């Protein structure tokens, strides 16, 4: 038996966690009374002015990238998403994506908290730096990512809101780490979600016509959705 629309709203509003970490944003299925997708209920709340709760923490004074040399020896993670990000960074000279060239990965945002932007890309044609949230398989060869598209969108929106007031410092330190002086030309900061084609989020993006509130929220936030 599913939750009602009211139960979803009350549960979402009662949580003190950052919005993207709340369990309700990741629920699949539809409400028992109105037949709406659970994610549509929350997307509608946000469109109507519900405030996005951000993590409590102080943004780093300096975005340092010690060890961000693309070496897998420094990155002991076995998570597929992190392997994917590392590989994209190592192929940055050959691969140019719709949101630009990858210039860094796993960029830590807050002091003493492991909250990282998966990838950062720069498009020199539009002078735009893009924060990219990546979602892939949970385990290599199996278990596609079960996170909803709403969850992915709220996560990268959270990172964007934390970093937007500090964009000049972010531009400058990324440029120094990348050893290419593009920062002086950077003018915009944007965000994107990059999801594996067999993930739940990618499926929901293909069915976005059935999720009008989520579609309007993505448009209102200006978030790019891409698949790989």
Image (cartoon, rainbow, N blue to C red):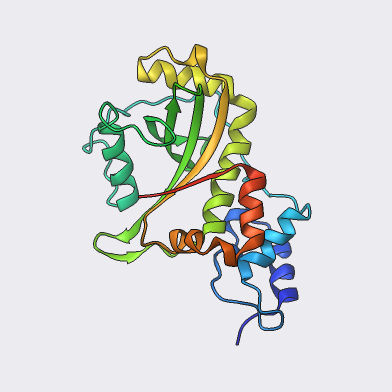
Within the image, what quadrant is residue 100 found in? top left
In the depicted view, which residue is nearer to us: 2 or 35? 35
Quick check: 18 above or below 40? above
Q: Position of residue 183 (x, y in %)?
A: 48, 16
Q: Is residue 1 left or right of residue 117?
A: right
Q: Quadrant of the N terminus?
A: bottom right
Considering every residue shown, the one lying at the far front of the view is: 209
Residue drawn at (67%, 60%) of the image? 213
In the depicted view, which residue is nearer to us: 108 or 141? 141
Within the image, what quadrant is residue 66 found in? top left
Considering every residue shown, the one lying at the far right of the view is: 49
Residue drawn at (66%, 53%) of the image? 216
Q: Is residue 213 left or right of residue 89?
A: right
Q: Position of residue 33 (x, y in %)?
A: 71, 83
Report whether residue 162 is seen: yes
Report whether residue 110 is seen: no
């Amino acid at each position: 038996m599913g939750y009602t629309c009211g139960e979803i709203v009350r549960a979402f509003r009662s949580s003190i966690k950052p919005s993207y970490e709340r369990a309700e944003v990741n629920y699949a299925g539809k409400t028992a009374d109105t037949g709406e997708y659970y994610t549509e209920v929350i997307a509608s709340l946000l469109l109507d002015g519900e405030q996005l709760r951000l993590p409590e923490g102080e943004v780093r004074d300096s975005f340092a990238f010690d060890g961000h040399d693309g070496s897998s020896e420094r990155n002991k993670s076995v998570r597929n998403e992190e392997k994917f990000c590392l590989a994209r960074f190592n192929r940055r000279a050959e691969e140019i994506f719709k949101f630009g060239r990858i210039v860094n990965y796993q960029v830590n945002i807050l002091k003493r908290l492991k909250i990282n932007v998966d990838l950062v890309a720069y498009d020199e044609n539009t002078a735009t730096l893009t924060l990219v949230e990546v979602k892939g398989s949970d385990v290599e060869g199996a278990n596609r990512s079960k996170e909803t598209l709403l969850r992915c969108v709220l996560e990268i929106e959270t990172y964007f809101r934390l970093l937007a007031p500090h964009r000049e410092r972010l531009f400058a330190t990324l440029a120094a780490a990348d050893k290419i002086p593009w920062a002086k030309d950077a003018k915009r900061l944007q965000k994107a979600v990059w999801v594996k084609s067999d993930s739940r989020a990618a499926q929901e993006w293909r069915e976005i016509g059935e999720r009008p509130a989520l579609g309007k929220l993505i448009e209102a936030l200006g978030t790019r959705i891409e698949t790989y």
